Image (cartoon, rainbow, N blue to C red):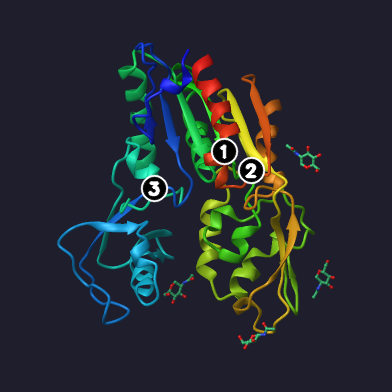
Amino acid sequence: MAVDKIAILFLFGIFAFTEAGTKLNPVVLVPGDGGSQFQAKLNKPTTVASYCIKKTDYYYDLWLNLEQLVPFLIDCFVDNMRLEYDNVTRTTRNSPGVDVKIPGFGGTETVEWLDHSHISLNEMKLFFVDLQQLIERAYYTTGNQKVFLLAHSMGNPVTLYFLNHMTNAWKAKFIQSFISLAGVWGGAAKPIRLMISAWLMPSDQFWGPDEVLVMAPTRNYTIRDYKQLFKDINYETGYMMWEDTHALINPLKAPGVEMHCLHGVNVTTPKAFRYTNKTWHESYPETIPDDGDGTVNIRSLHGCLKFKKMQKQPIYHKEFDKAEHMQILNLKSVIDYLKKVFVKS
Ligand SMILES: *[C@@H]1O[C@H](CO)[C@@H](O)[C@H](O)[C@H]1NC(C)=O
Ligand SMILES: *[C@@H]1O[C@H](CO)[C@@H](O)[C@H](O)[C@H]1NC(C)=O
Ligand SMILES: *[C@@H]1O[C@H](CO)[C@@H](O)[C@H](O)[C@H]1NC(C)=O
Ligand SMILES: *[C@@H]1O[C@H](CO)[C@@H](O)[C@H](O)[C@H]1NC(C)=O
């Protein structure tokens, strides 16, 4: 079968046909964080600076729009992009007066091109309903062809969580295979510095209770010290968000479908951070290196191997030398592997 004739029609949902019209299995994509577009419409009560736009009567590209990521304008962007955490309902909402929509669900363009000028797991209920419907639609519109789920980075815990909540009968009917690229199965040390996602904090299933993650002048922090760590960096909200999310896929439960687990190795990846300055959390730390894909530690990438003993469906595992966390999306050897899987089934 001519693999190069595969037409990619969708990217949240890719439907593939050969030129001769032979049906192939559809593919549904679950991108990582930062991996899809956002559009925003503004009617803000206040702005952080006089040059920030307060009101628009149209939706504009909020993420990713390189024109906004420049000095001064970036302050407006951050204020529009930020989430407010409600510590009573334990949910987040958009910055006041910012209406956000995610364009192109089920299509490919919005994840192929992040910048339009040439898009947290709890609170994702609507996404899971849409994802289930997209998978079922992909299956029926291709004449009952089972669906590949292809996930990258944080899309992997999202997909696992989704599969963990579907019945075995549903999975057996609709899912061909779960293909995982650069999966974050047990968190990663890198976001400790960025604090981009409390959900990605290193997990107690993968890090020992005495392993030091952050070295500060007066004390060290391990996975047991998250409460103190968030307090000491004046971000107690972060600890609440960690409490809300850390058990979503922890401890890991097998997906219950065939799986291909692909990831990079032999790329220097943060293992711990050493701060020497007294005002330590405002300074730049020294990074203690580990193996991994540059973002995710090797032990977390290997998390999918735990599924081997938990389910009867096969788990195929392949490491790609020096395949960095983002570059894996564009690596010829990975794409060749995917083409083989998609065509053979
Ligand atoms: C919740 O947030 C409010 C406003 O920021 C703050 O005053 C309060 O201390 C917080 N409560 C908890 C339990 O963190
Ligand atoms: C933090 O941990 C490092 C490495 O284990 C150790 O050398 C250092 O003395 C510890 N610092 C404190 C303040 O406990
Ligand atoms: C330590 O922090 C202070 C205040 O933020 C800063 O002025 C100073 O340059 C920092 N020193 C180092 C070695 O990073
Ligand atoms: C990673 O590097 C080690 C040491 O150089 C090497 O033995 C191993 O084969 C490499 N991994 C891959 C997948 O190439």
Q: Is residue 137 left or right of residue 236?
A: left
**Disc nearer the start of the sequence (2/1):** 2
Secondary structure at badge 2 equals loop
Confirm or reject: label 3 Cβ below 8 Å from ligand 4: no
Q: Are marks 2 and 3 in contact (CB under 8 Å)?
A: no
Amino acid at circle 2: Ala
Amino acid at circle 1: Leu
Residue identified by numbered label 3: 36
Expressed as whole percent of the image width and height from the top left, the position of residue 169 reads 47, 18
Residue identified by numbered label 2: 323
Residue 226, visible in the rendered structure: yes
Q: Residue at x 54, y 27 (%)?
A: 338
**Disc nearer the start of the sequence (1/3):** 3
Expressed as whole percent of the image width and height from the top left, the position of residue 148 reads 47, 25
Q: Are marks 2 and 1 in contact (CB under 8 Å)?
A: yes
Q: CA distance from mark 1 to mark 3?
A: 20 Å
- Report the label total: 3
Residue identified by numbered label 1: 331
Expressed as whole percent of the image width and height from the top left, the position of residue 128 reads 39, 38
Q: Is residue 343 left or right of residue 251?
A: left
Q: Is residue 329 left or right of residue 266?
A: left
Please tell me whether mark 1 or mark 3 is closer to you in this view.
1
Please tell me whether mark 2 or mark 3 is closer to you in this view.
2
Secondary structure at badge 1 equals loop
